[in-house]
Amino acid sequence: MIFTLLIAAFLAPTVPVQAQAPDVDLVSAAAEAPASAADLRGAHVTGWAAGSLRMRRRFFDAMTDAGFNAVVVALKDSDGRVFVPGVALAERQGAYVAAIPDLPGLARDIKGRGFYAIARIAVFKDDHMARARPDLAVRFPDGRVWEGDNGTAWLDPYLSETRDYAVEVASRAAAAGFDEIQFDYIRFPSDGKTRLCRYARKDSTPETEAAALKEFLAQARGALRPLGVKLSLCIFGLTTSVDSGMGIGQRLAEMASYVDYVSPMMYPSHYAKGEYGLKSPNRQPYLTIRRGIADALARLGPQGGKLRPYLQDFSLGVRYTPAHVRSQIRAAEELGVRGWILWNPQNRYAWSAIQAGPIVRLRSRAPSADALGEEPPR
């Protein structure tokens, strides 16, 4: 199946907040999730914004007004910056940044607002650590650190030390009081000259790649479940419809069996023209999401209750409006998937898409242009 992955680079501030990070006791303070995954309405916020009292208060106020009940905070970004204190490797290699001066305080603030607290941790896409520790990186055949099309380096998913690193970050996030750990970039590289990637395992194949990712998830589950947190993962949107591993090791149903929730990143802008037979998936968000969700439910079978997709609330190629966002939510909810998370890398959300009231099933009449997924008139 033809697909493309378009990556928008949104740069966060490079000057960290100057503050002393507190010690973190390895004691879980996990809370109960919303009644079920079907009731979760979440939004993602960067670690930089979450670390600013002024910015997060404004963000949380908007979430409350719009009826959200969950927030996802980036605690380890794909550039390698870590916002969780006390991780020895991160501090030794300069990856830790004190953007969130009081991590337990942030978790308390989130839950004090009545929100479910999710910590997002990027795993193998880690430019900083791959360059600081080339022995842990994916390499070119000549031994140099491999880089993708955007110049980003990756950690080798086969190495135990790279897996241990992510688990330690997650454990300390759980100890700080987050209710759920959400792993992102649990995959092999996808962009660039991937045929030149060299790993610790010389006989790397699609099967060994898929197995390596499942081994990591099994390790993480064993380490984190005793801390009382839920586990989830982000995964390519097209894994809902393609079960080959897509050259990155991700197989939806197999990976879902290790976690509580799975979140395909189903951004219509990331689907090639012609995908699902649609002329322009980016301009047809309703149909794109509906077809992807239908495939996901079929592929997950009895695990369908774990499905909690990321939906697009940013513009890339097409100017997205609240109507575009709402059409994606409606497509998911009409198929019984009422739990979802919105993504905007700049923390700018179309809150009015949710404030518009309950999302109901379409009546049996000719659907509107928006229902068909066409771009609504401006």
Image (cartoon, helix red, strand yellow):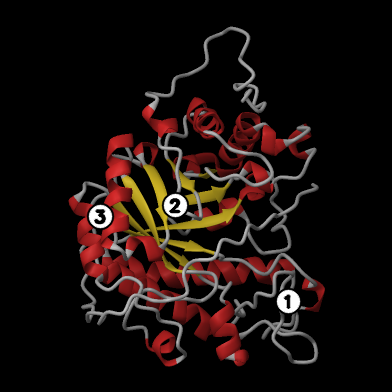
Residue 278, percent from left and from top: 76, 32
> For residue 74, what is the image quadrant?
bottom left
Of callouts 3 and 2, which one flags the residue occurring earlier in the amino acid sequence?
Answer: 3
Q: Nearer the viewer, mark 1 or mark 3?
A: 3
Q: Real-space Cα distance between discs 1 and 2?
A: 38 Å
Tell me the element at label 3. helix
Mark 2, residue position = 347
Residue 354, percent from left and from top: 40, 32
Residue 225, percent from left and from top: 33, 65
Q: Is residue 378 left or right of residue 163?
A: right
Image vertical order of residue 18 relative to residue 357, above or below: below
Do tag 3 and tag 2 residues touch (Cβ < 8 Å)?
no
Amino acid under disc 3: Ile
Q: Is residue 103 left or right of residue 165?
A: left
Q: How many C-alpha atoms fall within 10 Å of the one at disc 1: few (<14), some, or many (≥20)?
A: some
Of callouts 1 and 3, which one flags the residue occurring earlier in the amino acid sequence?
Answer: 3
Mark 3, residue position = 110
Identified at 56% across, 8% down, the residue is 364
Image vertical order of residue 67 relative to residue 209, above or below: above
Mark 1, residue position = 204
Please name whichever residue, 143 or 65, is drawn nearer the observer in this view of the structure.
65
